[in-house]
């Protein structure tokens, strides 16, 4: 029988603990998993928004949903509301907003309702997300996506969570140790390379030398193995996604029973956007901006204006948007911030960790050389980064705002050619599932539809009206969605009520 293979995960942030726990659960003892982390370096501790895929991950790890919500101070997230992205607020106070809900548009027939919405009178039709899903109504009414007792990770509407980032790592760490992960607190001080350029071992301050068959670099922006030791460069995408700084703070609610929003509020400003995330005891608020378009002082003023006072401490986090094209090199794989980071607009940090770890588990070289899956892994992960870049860019390039940051974003020279080609096609037809290679995508065609039509993008079907003869049936369906939405809003508990019930064990 082959010797048991050993994995060393370097880093104990969200990436390290998800990776270690996932591999321990996946291999059930057939692979040894050790995690080394330095408490004095600590974790980045930001990133409060998730994507619905996290439910599958937590469920797979065997973490009870109510326990997770209590321990990570989590709340439910039904999507993201984008305020002021199309236009800056008008002088009379009028503002534009739209929701990107997680629930897919209601689909009854093959072509769905989208073409019929496009053919409706623009002046009188409901906003896209409100017309095609009940989730818009439910979320706007501050209702929860489910009732208590509905079952772990299940409910009538799709959802993810908002959470305290440091506590998320702790919850997963506790589960990882239960699943058999060996936890070492200590600092990696040196990486030994073999003659062929692979990692021969790492030296630590508290545990001497450590060796493994596969090294997983989860050391965050420090990128101790993939960057410092192996010298793999980061490919910057700053020319496509301009934001490169964030200021983050926590603001208590005005009163203990204040409603908790069940969507992230992303409000555009002159050179970026702010996030506003409803956690259990406080709101996580942050400002993201492009340092080429706005000074740090002006960004701090944007955050102060948003919060409404300056009695808070904020933390500055500079970042370089980009990713390493080679993330699996010889016997080392990068997961999390060491592999790359794209700005947090659609909460893709954990999504990329989940994608990487699922591939590592399934492609793991149990018998052969440690780099056998490297080429495939690198191709798949790079494609995923590229598709997320396109999706993020879509939010910016459709804006009609006039500040330099927004004009630069609409400049075709800053829009990836693949996205430009799709936008050309979507002028004549809505996004389709055949526009994407599904296994590489984090976002589906309907996510693109929510952004496009929320931003008043025009798909002109007037020449093919005859291809959509079922308008009367579609109108009935739109009315049924309205009715279901009203009923669900009346039936579902308020978001704060559900969180209270979960905390009280009801
Ligand atoms: P870290 O949390 O930095 O962990 C690195 C670990 O490596 C730590 O344990 C550290 O101690 C250890 N380490 C480093 N060097 C050594 C050494 N020499 N020896 C031993 N140990 C070492 N993601 C989302 O999914 N949703 C969001 O809404 C979101 N928002 C974000 C907002 C901002 C402003 C930023 C910057 C990121 C955001 N992210 C978000 C991304 C998210 O924060 C990360 O993907 C996630 O936290 C994973 O980080 P990590 O584990 O890779 O790194």
Image (cartoon, grey):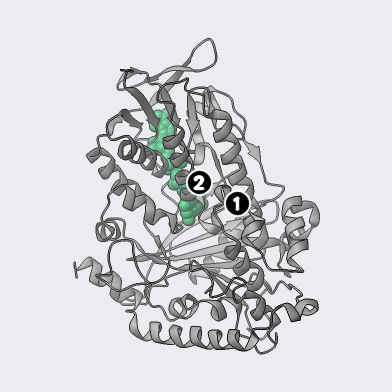
Left or right placement of residue 121 versus residue 63 in this view: right
The CB of the residue at mark 1 lies under 8 Å from ligand 1: no
x, y (%) of residue 248? 48, 56
Looking at the rendered structure, the secondary structure element under dot 1 is helix
Left or right placement of residue 482 versus residue 34 in this view: right
Residue drawn at (55%, 88%) of the image: 476
Q: Are marks 1 and 2 in contact (CB under 8 Å)?
A: yes
x, y (%) of residue 182? 27, 31
In the picture, the quarter occupied by the N terminus is: top left
Cα separation between marks 1 and 2: 10 Å
Is 205 placed above or below 287 here? above
The one of 128 and 93 positioned closer to us in this rendering: 128
Q: Is residue 404 visible?
A: no
Badge 1 or badge 2: first in the primary sequence: 2
The CB of the residue at mark 2 lies under 8 Å from ligand 1: yes
x, y (%) of residue 353? 46, 44
Left or right placement of residue 333 versus residue 4 in this view: right
In the picture, the quarter occupied by the C terminus is: bottom left
The one of 56 and 311 positioned closer to us in this rendering: 56
Residue drawn at (34%, 83%) of the image: 491
Residue 352 is tagged as 2
Residue 388 is tagged as 1
Looking at the rendered structure, the secondary structure element under dot 2 is helix
Is 466 placed above or below 270 here? below
Local packing at callout 1 (Cα closer than 10 Å; few below 14, some 14-19, many 20+) is many
Direction left: furthest residue: 505
Q: Quadrant of ligand 1?
A: top left
Local packing at callout 2 (Cα closer than 10 Å; few below 14, some 14-19, many 20+) is many
**Number of numbered discs overlaid on the protein picture:** 2
């Amino acid at each position: 029988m082959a010797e048991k293979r050993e994995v060393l995960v370097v880093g104990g942030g969200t990436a390290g603990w998800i990776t270690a726990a996932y591999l321990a659960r996946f291999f059930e003892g057939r692979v040894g998993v050790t995690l080394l982390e330095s408490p004095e370096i600590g974790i980045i501790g930001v990133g409060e928004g998730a994507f619905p895929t996290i439910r599958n991950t937590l469920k797979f790890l065997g973490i009870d949903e109510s326990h997770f919500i209590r321990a990570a101070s989590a709340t439910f997230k039904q999507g993201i509301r984008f305020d002021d992205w199309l236009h800056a607020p008008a002088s009379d106070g009028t503002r534009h907003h739209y929701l990107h809900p997680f629930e897919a548009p209601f689909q009854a027939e093959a072509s769905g309702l989208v073409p019929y919405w496009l053919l409706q009178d623009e002046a009188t039709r409901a906003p896209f997300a409100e017309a095609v899903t009940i989730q818009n109504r439910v979320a706007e009414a501050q209702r929860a996506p489910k009732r208590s007792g509905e079952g772990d990770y299940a409910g009538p509407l799709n959802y993810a969570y908002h959470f305290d980032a440091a506590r998320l790592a702790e919850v997963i760490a506790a589960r990882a140790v239960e699943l058999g992960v060996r936890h070492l607190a200590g600092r990696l001080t040196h990486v030994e390379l073999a003659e062929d350029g692979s990692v021969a071992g790492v030296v630590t301050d508290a545990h001497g030398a450590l060796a493994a068959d596969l090294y997983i670099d989860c050391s965050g922006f420090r990128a101790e193995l993939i960057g410092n030791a192996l010298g793999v460069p980061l490919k910057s995408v700053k020319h496509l996604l301009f934001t490169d700084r964030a200021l983050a703070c926590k603001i208590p609610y005005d009163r203990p029973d204040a409603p908790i929003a069940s969507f992230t509020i992303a409000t555009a400003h002159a050179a970026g956007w702010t996030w506003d995330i409803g956690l259990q005891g406080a709101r996580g608020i942050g400002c993201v901006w492009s340092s080429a378009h706005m000074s740090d002082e002006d960004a701090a003023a944007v955050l102060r204006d948003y919060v409404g006072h300056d009695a808070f401490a904020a933390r500055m986090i500079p970042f370089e948007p980009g990713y390493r094209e080679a993330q699996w090199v010889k016997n080392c794989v990068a997961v999390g911030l060491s592999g790359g980071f794209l700005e947090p607009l659609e909460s893709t940090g954990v999504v990329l960790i989940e994608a990487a770890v699922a591939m590592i588990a399934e492609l793991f070289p149990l018998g052969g050389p440690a780099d056998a899956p490297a080429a495939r892994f690198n191709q798949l992960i790079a494609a995923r980064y590229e598709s997320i870049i396109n999706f993020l860019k879509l939010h910016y390039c459709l804006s009609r705002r006039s500040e330099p940051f927004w004009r630069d974003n609409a400049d075709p020279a800053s829009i990836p050619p693949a996205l430009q080609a799709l936008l050309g096609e979507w002028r004549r037809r809505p996004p389709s599932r055949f526009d994407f290679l599904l296994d590489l995508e984090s976002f589906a065609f309907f996510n693109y539809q929510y952004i496009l039509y929320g931003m008043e993008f025009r798909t002109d079907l007037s020449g093919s009206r005859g291809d959509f003869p079922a308008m009367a049936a579609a109108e009935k369906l739109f009315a049924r969605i309205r009715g279901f939405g009203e009923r669900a809003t009346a039936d579902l508990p308020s978001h704060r009520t559900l969180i209270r019930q979960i905390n009280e064990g009801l």
